[in-house]
Amino acid sequence: MATLNKLFVTLSILSLFACSTNAQLFPNFYGRTCPSLQTIVRREMTKAINNEARIGASILRLFFHDCFVNGCDGSILLDDTSTFTGEKNAGPNKNSARGFEVIDAIKTSVEAACSATVSCADILALATRDGIALLGGPSWIVPLGRRDARTASQSAANTQIPSPASDLSTLTKMFQNKGLTLRDLTVLSGAHTIGQAECQFFRNRIYNETNIDTNFATLRKANCPLSGGDTNLAPLDSVSPVTFDNNYYRDLVANKGLLNSDQALFNGVGSPVSLVRAYSINGFAFRRDFAFAMVKMSRISPLTGTNGEIRKNCRLVN
Ligand code: HEM
Ligand SMILES: *[C@@H]1O[C@H](CO)[C@@H](O)[C@H](O)[C@H]1NC(C)=O
C-alpha cells in the first residue's frame, strides 16, 4: 500500500511537472520525421570545432541571447532587411554575436535530409549541446519541438540581455524575469569557462576596480589600452578558454573574473559565494548542474503547436 501511494504521488508530481514546463517539448519530437537530425548536427559541429574551437563558445552565447529575448525561438538568427529590424544589431549582439554561418551549414544539411521539418530554434539548441560536449563539457538530452519566430525584437534584445557592467542585484532580477534563480545565474555564468570578450567590455574593470588581482589586471591591460583596441580579445577563462571545465570559478575565487558581471558572483558577500567556492573545487557538481540549468534555459517560452513556423532559411521568415 505504501509503495502504491508512493507511486501515485510520484506520478502526480511527474504530470504536474510536465504541464507546467511546456510538455509539448520532448526529446524524440523528430524521431520519425527526421531520424538523422542528431547525427547531422553532431557531424557539422565536429567540423566547425575542428576548424575553430572558439565557435562552440560563440554558438552557446547565441543560444543564450536567443532564449533571453522572447524565448528560444530562433529570433536572433534573422537578418535585418530594408523592411525588417531584427536582433543582430542590438547592442549586445552587434559586431560580437558570431557563429551564424555554422547554423546555416547545419540547416542546409538538415534540409537535405528532411526538408521543412526541423526548426532553426531546435538546431541551435542541439548545436549548443554538441559544442559544449566537444569542448570537454557535459552532455544532456535536448527537449525538442520549438518552432521559429516570425518576428524579432531589437528593443527587447537591448533591454533583456544583461550588460557586463551589471551588479549582482540587476543580474538576479534579469534572470528572475526569465524564470531563472540566483543559483541558475551562478551556474549558467560558468559558460564563461569558454570563449573570449572584447576589451571594451572589461576595460573599466581592469583600470578602475579594486576587487581584482593586480597581476591579472596588469596582464590584461597589455592588450587592452586605455583608449583604442576596443575589439581586442581576452579569454573569459584565464587558463583554459577552449576547454569546458570549472576553471572559471577558480578565477573568480582568485579575483580574476574578467567581466564585472563575473566577479559580481564572488565579491565577498551574498549567497552565490558558497556555490562559486563549491564549483571551484568540484568540477563534477558544476557539470551536472550546468547540464540541468541549460535544459531549464532551453525551455524558456518556446513557440509550439501551430505557433510560429519552420523556417526554410534561418536568416529569413518564410
Ligand atoms: C550573467 C550575465 C552575462 C553577461 C553580462 C554576459 C556578458 C558577456 C560578454 C560581454 C561577452 C563578451 C562578448 C564579446 O566581447 O563579443 C560574453 C561572452 C560569452 N558569453 Fe556571456 N554573459 C552573461 C551570461 C552568459 C550565459 C548565461 C551564457 C550561456 C549560458 C553566456 C555565454 C557566453 C559565451 C560562451 C561567451 C563567449 C563567446 C565567444 O567567444 O564568441 N554568457 N558574455
Ligand atoms: C573609470 O571611472 C571613471 C569614473 O566613473 C570613468 O569616467 C572612466 O571612464 C573609467 N575608466 C575606464 C578606463 O573605464
Image (tube, grey):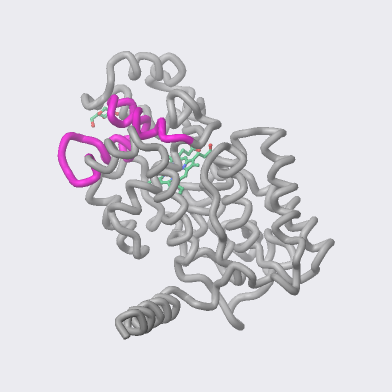
- What is the x, y in percent for residue 214? 28, 16
Q: In this view, does 26 lie above or below 54?
A: below
**260 or 86, which lies in front?**
260
Quadrant for the N terminus, please. Answer: bottom left
Write down the quadrant of residue 164 in the picture: top left
Quadrant for the C terminus, please. Answer: bottom right
Residue at 28% x, 53% y is 182
Q: Residue furthest right?
A: 112
Q: Magenta segment: does it hold 298?
A: no
**196 or 51, which lies in front?**
51
Q: Magenta segment: does it hold 262?
A: yes
- What is the x, y in percent for residue 217? 33, 19
Ligand 1: image quarter: top left
Compared across the picture, whether 101 is left or right of 168 comes to right
**How many labels, in total?**
0
- What is the x, y in percent for residue 35? 75, 66
Compared across the picture, whether 198 is left or right of 189 comes to right
Write down the quadrant of residue 165 in the picture: top left
Compared across the picture, whether 153 is left or right of 125 comes to left
Q: Residue furthest left?
A: 269
Residue at 56% x, 59% y is 141
- What is the x, y in percent for residue 259? 36, 34
Q: In this view, does 115 lie above or below 223?
A: below
**3 or 17, which lies in front?**
3
Q: What stretch is highlighted in magenta?
A: 245-273
Residue at 75% x, 50% y is 105
